[in-house]
Image (cartoon, rainbow, N blue to C red):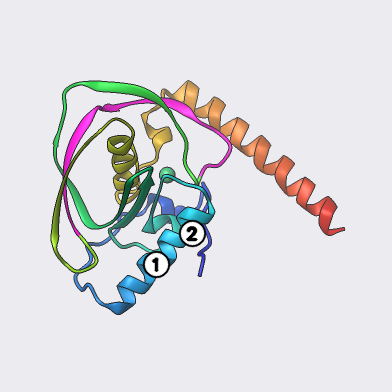
């Protein structure tokens, strides 16, 4: 069952997610719903706080890289950074260039409780960092200068208003 994606400025997006202590059927069921929601929204990734669940779980689907990661942590990040346009399912319609480490090493658990070690670069590394930020209440807009952030959020608000107006017309 697809879950509702929380949109900025929903306060849950700023909260710190708690580590998962028990990997059981209930958690696996939630992970399935998280994956389904990500796929329906055509996202590269989705983090549990984005559907209002404050647990350290992320899902990722970038071409051949598909993962559900529990309690992920970055073990190492490259000095080298790359700049790329980035958006977020919780701040739809806008994007901005963000610099992030090009390559990272991540440790996490899978849905069987087994440890996974990943070494990823480029887009996959970026999505991993973006989703892990969500577990700490960090959003990509936090990396922008204040001026850029304000411009982007103004545009976001404008789009949101236009969208709700067009929806209202249809429902009338
Ligand atoms: Zn996001």
Along the line of sight, the residue nearer the viewer: 150 or 52: 52
Residue 58 point in image, percent of width and height: 32, 54
Q: How far is disc 2 from disc 1 in space, using C-alphas?
A: 9 Å
Residue 52 visible within the image: no
The numbered mark, 2 or 1, whose residue comes first in the sequence reads 1
Residue 77 point in image, percent of width and height: 16, 33
Q: Which residue is mark 2?
A: 37
Q: Quadrant of residue 56?
A: bottom left
* Few, some or many residues within 10 Å of mark 1 (<14, 14–19, 20+): some
Q: Ligand 1 falls in which quarter?
A: top left
- SS at mark 2? helix
* Few, some or many residues within 10 Å of mark 2 (<14, 14–19, 20+): many
Residue 99 against residue 166 in the figure, above or below: above
Q: Which residue is mark 1?
A: 32
- The residue drawn where x is 82% and y is 59% is 171
From the viewer's perspective, tell me whether residue 171 is left or right of residue 85.
Answer: right
Q: Which residues are magenta?
A: 91-109
Task: Assign the C terminus to one quadrant of the image.
Answer: bottom right
Residue 57 point in image, percent of width and height: 30, 59
Residue 115 point in image, percent of width and height: 12, 59
């Amino acid at each position: 069952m697809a879950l509702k994606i929380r949109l900025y400025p929903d306060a849950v997006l700023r909260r710190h997610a708690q580590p998962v202590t028990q990997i059981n059927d209930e958690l696996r069921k939630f992970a399935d719903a998280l994956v389904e929601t990500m796929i329906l929204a055509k996202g590269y990734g989705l983090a549990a706080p984005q559907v209002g669940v404050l647990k350290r779980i992320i899902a990722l689907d970038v071409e051949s890289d598909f993962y559900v990661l529990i309690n992920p942590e970055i073990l190492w990040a490259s000095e080298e950074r790359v700049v790329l346009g980035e958006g977020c399912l919780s701040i739809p319609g806008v994007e901005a260039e963000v610099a992030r480490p090009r390559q990272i090493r991540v440790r996490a658990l899978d849905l069987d409780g087994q440890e996974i070690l990943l070494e990823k670069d480029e887009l996959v590394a970026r999505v991993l960092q973006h989703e892990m930020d969500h577990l700490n209440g960090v959003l990509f807009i936090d990396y922008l200068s204040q001026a850029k952030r304000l411009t982007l959020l103004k545009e976001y608000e404008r789009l949101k208003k236009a969208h709700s107006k067009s929806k209202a017309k249809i429902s009338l």
